[in-house]
Image (tube, rainbow, N blue to C red):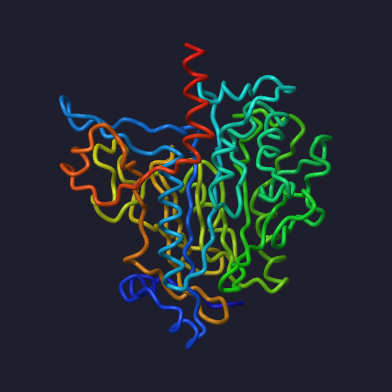
Amino acid sequence: MRTRIGAAATALALAASIPMAAGAAAQDESVTLTLLHNNDGESSLATLGYGQGEDGPTLEVGGAPAFKAVTEREIADARAQGNSVVNVYAGDSFLASALLACSAPEDGESSEPVYDAIAQAQMPYDVHVFGNHEFDYGPDFLQRFIAAFGDDMGLTQPFISANLDFTAEAGFADLIDEDGIIDGEVSDDRVIGSSVIVTDAETGESFGVVGATTERLPIISSPRNVAVADAVPVIQAQVDALTAAGVNKIIFVSHLQGIDADKDVIAQLSGVDIAVAGGGDELLANDDSQRLPGERAETYGTYPVYATAADGAEVPIVTTAGHYRYLGRLDATFDADGVLTGIVAEASYPRRVVPLEQEEAGLIEELGITDAVESDPDIISSVLDPLNGCIADLK
């Protein structure tokens, strides 16, 4: 059994870890992973207004175009430090709303664009995990959503969950990976699996990502013939399979409806290094400067929080508040054997999403916001512009 960072070492690792340059990593064969993550975007493709007090002006936050810009900024920063990068979406990619209505989710034969997919396909995700809202309009619309990620090269975006079985849904037969482990780039359109091996193109390091979805799916959504299994045994089986395949850095990404559910599951698992929780919308932050001005959500805890696994490992858990308001970034160091040795504290916290171009330009300066970004023009033109036209027609 591999030795991982234990409870006694956690605080020391948090305090002592520092970002490492590529040269330093090469000398001691350590690996620094920048794990980017978000969850519960729920069709909030446009910005949200955050009022600054009862009579104060409104700051526009979030939105898919600015979120993409923040993601690209953080990837560039990680690459400059020689880090590996893995970017995951922890479920609830869309939600019933006026914006989703523009994609005609109730019409199984519709050729309307699925705008959530168009937006997300332009973001550099390595893998999506199925949430519960992906099934709100049944498997037929979910199939349309997945197909909308395709291009001239076919389907390449993996979608995973270890405890979901799609084999009884005839329309998914050609999408299911045969052994459940999607290894590297997809070339045969089989994008649905239980786990995925992400090999970083620049560092060559491999990371296993195991997905899971809430067992309450048949109660809270409409999966039809998609079967839901007990999560713990199938998650552990995937962790063991990845380890047997030589992957020694394992990330558990779930949509179990919140951090507390993840803690319960992790307590029954061995071999997990890091966990990303989805479905709870908890806000983790280490100080007020990491919260959006006017943020209404209370802070659940520090970034990350920890859970004790069955093998005694202290597993860091991260999540973000949804609606594209924050991008999570966790920088973690591993030794040459894939043992988690620490968290780079100064680099690990949620990144706020604030568009630079908004009418109250002076408000950004007034609030002391120095991390605002220019929104991505391609998502504006391909997603927000047609959505604005659709909403106007609906009204």
Q: Is residue 17 above or below residue 316?
A: below
Left or right placement of residue 91 versus residue 186 in this view: left
Left or right placement of residue 35 versus residue 52 in this view: right
Coordinates of residue 208 in the picture (x, y in percent): 63, 64
Q: Is residue 97 above or below residue 302?
A: above
Res 5 seen here = no
* Numbered marks: total: 0
Coordinates of residue 148 in the picture (x, y in percent): 67, 37
Res 70 seen here = yes
At 30% across and 41% down in the image, what residue appears?
298
At 37% across and 69% down in the image, what residue appears?
344
At 43% across and 84% down in the image, what residue appears?
24
Quarter of the image with the N terminus in it: bottom right
Between residue 231 and residue 115, name the one nearer to us: 115
Coordinates of residue 290 in the picture (x, y in percent): 29, 51
Coordinates of residue 52 in the picture (x, y in percent): 20, 33
